[in-house]
């Protein structure tokens, strides 16, 4: 695996750090330095709350290379409370079926590993159902 | 800019070609197109391909293919736009000749996918999405389309079976295409019982990969008219991009780049959706065919499945799609697909489409979609009589 590429994303992967636009207040994730709403420069860091809801989801029965050991697993597009959407795995799912609109919150989990005990392990955000 | 026309087409059957290499596939399509055009040379070569670097350990396909087909010393480059690489190569060739810079061009799309294990190909296909924020989360390309389809079904109240006729029509047409990957029809029962890859997408919603190549020869319209050929004019060409990641779109259920590129093509051609006789849509998944039909103006938002349910998409319908099998049955050798679509539109406009000929076809459209809708290229071809 390409270590620098993952290391570089640690603020986003561990803490959902995006940006806020100083011109129109739009919250931006992932960071892109240019506001997608007003096209102004937007480099002010902003940490998201990690709260959101399921916009859509699917269950992966056939995984891409590196994720086989986790099948079946659920991936979702999560609409964050602050506005943007993010693609992530869902975790800690109990017997309750996943539903569109279901409230979820961000947790840090192991996403994948290199496949041998000396390989790199990638940690990052997943989302779990909010305890009622 | 001067008008241009397609004077030659060539293709190879999409299959697992264990005995043919990347360059041989491309060469077979190129030689067929040159022979069809009745000429031995062209000025330039534009190669559409997505994954030869990883799948075949070969890059630099401009020189590589030009050398193989006897075009060394001529200008040649490779064009990459994921699954829309084929149409991107065609558009580049069209612009090169239209500009007057070159007097002829050959566009070929080629993908050799069976040199690598399928799990590696699945991973490679996912590189068309956002590596950091989509693929690294464990999503496959199928999964991204499943996320869109799940939401689409939720918002508009369709059932999975409502999408069946997209696949049934494609397979019914593929029966009569000797170049198609699959030549057998499928039933509604088979569609509903197929293995689910990523809920709600099952294996019969999805198009198969394979080895393939397709090519076309492009010259100025004036020259094409002087030939003893049915003249097929490139009347419109449009291209647009969208966010690389689905989650960054304000409406993930609307293919904005399809809307924009088709509008460019309609405007150039001076035509509207009702004047399109057939449409080779990018039916990589049933949901993608649906969204493409809506964005191009053939159905209202959320109403694409109605065209399939009402059989409007069959060769005798109001807007025939996948007339030679589409991605679903003809096959989807990613970087080659856009050129197959062009070849098939030309066959229809020449009235050489056999059992699935659209009656009196004069105007055909092809739309090639890269990634999950992040790069969309639309062409309109017109038969000149
Ligand atoms: Zn802004």
Image (cartoon, coloured by chain):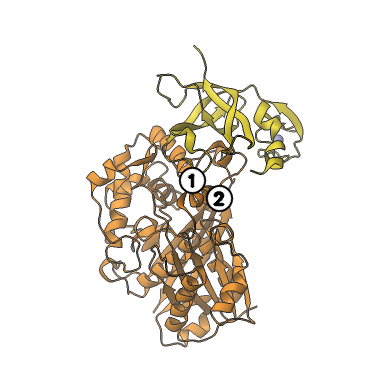
Report if residue B1 is visible in the image.
no
Using residue B365 as the reference point, say whether residue A114 is left or right of it. Answer: right
Q: Give the percent coordinates (x, y) of residue A4.
A: 72, 41
Nearer to us in this view, B327 or B296: B327
Whether residue B217 is situated above or below residue A13 in the rendered picture: below
Local crowd size for mark 2, using a 10 Å CA cut-off: few (<14), some (14–19), many (≥20): many
Residue farthest to the top, as pictured? A132
Q: Quadrant of ligand 1?
A: top right
**What is the chain letter for disc 2?**
B
Disc 1: CA contacts within 10 A as few (<14), some (14-19) or many (>=20): many
Q: Position of residue B345 (x, y in %)?
A: 40, 68
- Give the SS element for disc 2: helix
Residue bearing mark 2: B128
Q: Left or right? Give the position of A94 relative to A51.
A: left
**Chain letter corresponding to the colour orange:** B
Residue under pointer 1: B141
Whether the residues at callouts 1 and 2 have beta carbons within 8 Å, the answer is: yes
């Amino acid at each position: 695996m390409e270590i620098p590429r993952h290391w570089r994303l640690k603020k986003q992967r561990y803490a959902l750090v995006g940006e806020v636009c100083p011109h129109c207040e739009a919250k931006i994730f992932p960071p892109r330095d240019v506001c997608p709403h007003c096209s102004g420069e937007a480099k002010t860091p902003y940490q998201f709350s990690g709260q959101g809801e399921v916009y859509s989801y699917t269950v992966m029965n056939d995984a891409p290379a590196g994720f086989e050991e986790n099948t079946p697993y659920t991936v979702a597009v999560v609409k964050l409370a602050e506005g943007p959407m993010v693609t992530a795995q869902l975790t800690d799912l109990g017997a309750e079926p996943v539903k569109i609109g279901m409230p979820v919150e961000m947790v840090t989990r192991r996403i994948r590993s290199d496949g041998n005990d000396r390989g790199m392990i990638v940690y990052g955000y997943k989302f779990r159902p909010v305890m009622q | 800019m001067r008008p241009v026309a397609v004077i030659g087409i060539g293709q190879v059957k999409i299959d697992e070609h264990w005995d043919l290499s990347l360059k041989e596939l491309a060469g077979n399509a190129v030689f067929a197109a040159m022979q069809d055009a009745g000429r031995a040379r062209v000025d330039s070569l534009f190669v559409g391909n997505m994954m030869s670097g990883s799948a075949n350990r070969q890059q630099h396909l401009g020189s590589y293919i030009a050398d193989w087909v006897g075009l060394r010393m001529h200008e040649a480059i490779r064009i990459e736009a994921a699954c829309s690489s084929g149409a991107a190569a065609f558009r580049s060739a069209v612009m090169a000749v239209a500009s007057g810079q070159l007097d002829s061009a050959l566009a070929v799309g080629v993908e050799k996918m069976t040199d690598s294990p399928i799990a590696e190909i699945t991973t490679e296909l996912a590189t068309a999405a956002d590596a950091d924020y989509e693929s690294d989360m464990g999503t496959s390309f199928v999964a991204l389309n499943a996320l869109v389809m799940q939401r689409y079904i939720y918002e508009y109240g369709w059932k999975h079976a409502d999408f069946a006729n997209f696949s049934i029509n494609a397979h019914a047409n593929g029966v009569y295409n000797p170049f198609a990957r699959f030549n057998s029809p499928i039933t509604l029962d088979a569609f509903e019982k197929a293995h689910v890859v990523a809920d709600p997408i099952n294996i019969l919603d999805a198009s198969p990969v394979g080895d393939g190549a397709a090519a076309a020869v492009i010259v100025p319209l004036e020259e094409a008219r002087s030939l003893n050929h049915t003249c097929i004019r490139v009347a419109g060409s449009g291209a647009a991009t969208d966010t690389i990641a689905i989650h960054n779109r304000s409406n993930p259920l609307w293919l904005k780049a399809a809307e924009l590129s088709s509008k460019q093509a309609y405007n150039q051609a001076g035509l509207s959706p009702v004047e399109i006789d057939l449409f080779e849509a990018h039916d990589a998944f049933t949901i993608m065919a649906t969204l493409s039909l809506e964005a191009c103006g053939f159905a209202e938002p959320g109403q694409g499945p109605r065209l399939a349910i009402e059989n409007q998409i069959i060769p005798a319908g109001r807007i025939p799609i996948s007339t030679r099998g589409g991605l679903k049955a003809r096959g989807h050798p990613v970087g080659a697909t856009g050129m197959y679509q062009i070849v098939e539109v030309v066959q229809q406009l020449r009235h050489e489409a056999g059992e699935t000929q659209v009656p009196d076809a004069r105007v055909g459209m092809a739309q090639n979609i890269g990634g999950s809708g992040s790069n969309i290229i639309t062409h309109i071809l017109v038969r000149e009589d």
